[in-house]
Amino acid sequence: MKKGQFIVVEGIEGAGKSSAISVIEQVLSKHNIKFINTREPGGTPLAESLREIVKSADHDEILTEETELLLMYASRSQLLTNRILPALEKGIWVIGDRHDLSSRAYQGGGRGFDDELMDTIAKVTMKDFTPQLTLYLDISPELGLSRAQARGELDRIELEKIEFFHRVRNKYLEIALADDNIKIVDASEPMISVHENIRQNVETFLSRL
Ligand SMILES: Nc1ncnc2c1ncn2[C@@H]1O[C@H](COP(=O)(O)OP(=O)(O)O)[C@@H](O)[C@H]1O
Ligand SMILES: [Mg+2]
């Protein structure tokens, strides 16, 4: 049996990841491809507990940047080993709401952990595993956060200052521009054009398999 493929959707809060994922689901279903969904941090019972810790804005003590970094990778290790890899082995595709690129952008770009350190932790966690296709939804932090705010309460990371999200976006763009497996989608466009762009990217990916 052919192995499954791992498609990831990335972008800052409010970029439109959740609705992009439903478009990918439609395309895969049309092609009779079986898939599961994951989200990061989280996606297994243990990883979801780590998500709670990392996202909660009301701890009695400060969550250090180092703890945040390590919890993200701890969560990713659980998810990769216990859900993503077993699914792909069985020929089931995986649609990820965030993956390693988020850590590169948030903990790397946003918090300032350097590339070499990020490479090392990623290597320990994932060996050479990498998604086959990543759709990065690019949007200005101002627009993204205003959409996210309209959606509901902001979590611990979403409460960061706007400069933090500018660093996150810059890192996303820097990495995306250097990697052929990452497609940049202009997420500031109206939903209908964003969705058409995503549909085309996924169809093109499918046609090249
Ligand atoms: N292209 C778009 N134009 C306008 N609003 C959008 C667009 N894409 C998403 N939204 C809205 O913005 C909000 C955040 O989108 P969502 O998919 O939840 O983002 P994310 O999952 O990336 O945080 C939702 O209310 C969604 O309906
Ligand atoms: Mg979402």
Image (tube, rainbow, N blue to C red):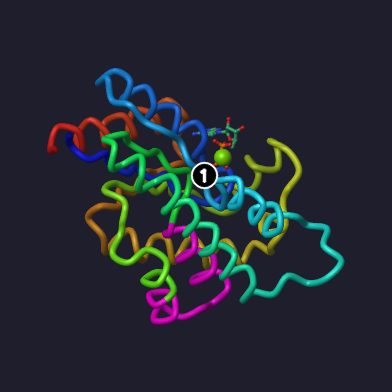
The answer to whether residue 15 is above or below residue 56 is above
- Label 1: state its secondary structure: strand
Q: Main secondary structure of the magenta part?
A: helix
- Horizontal arrangement in the rendering, residue 166 relative to residue 204 (left or right): right
The answer to whether residue 10 is above or below residue 172 is above
- Horizontal arrangement in the rendering, residue 85 relative to residue 151 (left or right): left
The residue under the point 42% across, 53% down is 80
The residue under the point 54% across, 45% down is 43
In the image, residue 83 lies at what x, y percent? 44, 45
Quadrant in the rendering for residue 45: top right
In the image, residue 18 lies at what x, y percent? 52, 35
Spot the residue most to the left: 208
The residue under the point 63% across, 40% down is 147
Q: Which amino acid type is marked by label 1?
A: Arg
Quadrant in the rendering for residue 187: top left
Q: Which residue is mark 1?
A: 39
- Horizontal arrangement in the rendering, residue 53 relative to residue 39 (left or right): right
In the image, residue 179 lies at what x, y percent? 26, 60
Q: Is residue 99 in the magenta section? A: no
Position of the N terminus by quadrant: top left
Range of residues picked out in magenta:
100-120
